[in-house]
Amino acid sequence: MTGATLRYVVAALGVCAGASAWAQSTAPQPLIYTCVNAAGKKLTSDRLIPECNDREQRVLNSDGSVRKIIGPTLTAEEKTRVDAEEKTKVAEQAAKAEAKRADRNLLNRFPDEAAHAKARVKALDNVKTSLKVSEDRLAALAKERKPLTDEAEFYVGKPLPAKLKAQLDANDTAVEAQRVLIQNQKLEAVRIDQNYDLQLDRLKKLWAGASPGSLGALAETTAAPATGKAISPPTASVNK
């Protein structure tokens, strides 16, 4: 064998040895599963150990270092409880995030008490405008009813003509609807005022330095609708 050939063989063997070492270094290393069973005996395996499903199992690297720890397998009841706890935790975190977002929005909308007071007045003015429209409509219905009742006096003790009766019924329905609407508008004004009171109380704490989200969720009042025949009034006026 010549010197050149010998050098070639040695180089080739070196490449093969290097490739083998690289393959060994990149090949998946075997894992070792170990646990202590109910009898206190230490068990070892190359896979999860069924006898230790109800307890912790350690997964070791080939050098004996801990790769991860696997908790016990849960029963159906335990899994249901854990899932419920997790859902509760997620809901609480979402509520905290929402409270923080809401507080920041409040601070952006109302940098001071004057801005908040101005917004309150505007919100209440909108309701007052709607209330005035309903009250005007109620007054108009009263005027429309006057000639109908005057005509009905000619039929005391007698059946009313179908047209007159229909006109009176339509007027009654429209009046009742407007009264319910007016009551609901008054309740809405109370609700708006109460909500602005709650906002102001919260804002004062935030302006004083409380962290957004630290005060919990902002409660809001909901006014119950007025009882009655909530029937939409006819759009056309009563025929005379």
Image (tube, helix red, strand yellow):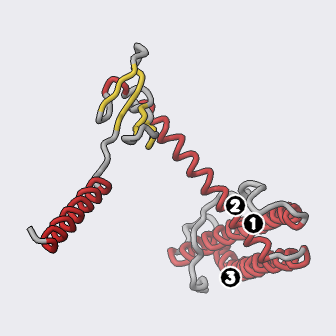
Q: Position of residue 70 (x, y in %)?
A: 43, 37
**Quarter of the figure with residue 185:** bottom right
Q: Are marks 2 and 1 in contact (CB under 8 Å)?
A: yes
**In this view of the protein, which residue sits in the foreground, 111 or 138?**
111
Kind of residue at disc 3: Glu
Q: Secondary structure at mark 3?
A: helix
Q: Position of residue 84 (x, y in %)?
A: 50, 41
**In this view of the protein, which residue sits in the foreground, 153 or 211?**
211
Q: Position of residue 203 (x, y in %)?
A: 84, 66
Kind of residue at disc 1: Asp
Q: Quadrant of the C terminus?
A: bottom right
Marked residue nearer the N-terminal end (1 or 3): 1
Nearest to viewer (mark 1 / mark 3): 1
Tag 1 residue: 103
**In this view of the protein, which residue sits in the foreground, 102 or 143?**
102
Q: CA distance from mark 2 to mark 3?
A: 52 Å
Q: Which residue is drawn at the image coordinates 78% and 77% (left, top)? A: 109
Q: As drawn, which residue projects farthest toward the front?
A: 2
Kind of residue at disc 2: Ala
Q: Secondary structure at mark 2?
A: helix
Q: Are marks 1 and 3 in contact (CB under 8 Å)?
A: no
Q: Which residue is drawn at the image coordinates 44% and 43% (left, top)? A: 67
Tag 2 residue: 99
**In this view of the protein, which residue sits in the foreground, 168 or 216?**
216
- Where 147 falls versus 35 (above or below)? below
Number of the label disc, if any, that sits on residue 144: 3
Nearest to viewer (mark 2 / mark 3): 2
Marked residue nearer the N-terminal end (2 or 3): 2
**Quarter of the figure with residue 189:** bottom right
Q: Position of residue 80 (x, y in %)?
A: 44, 36
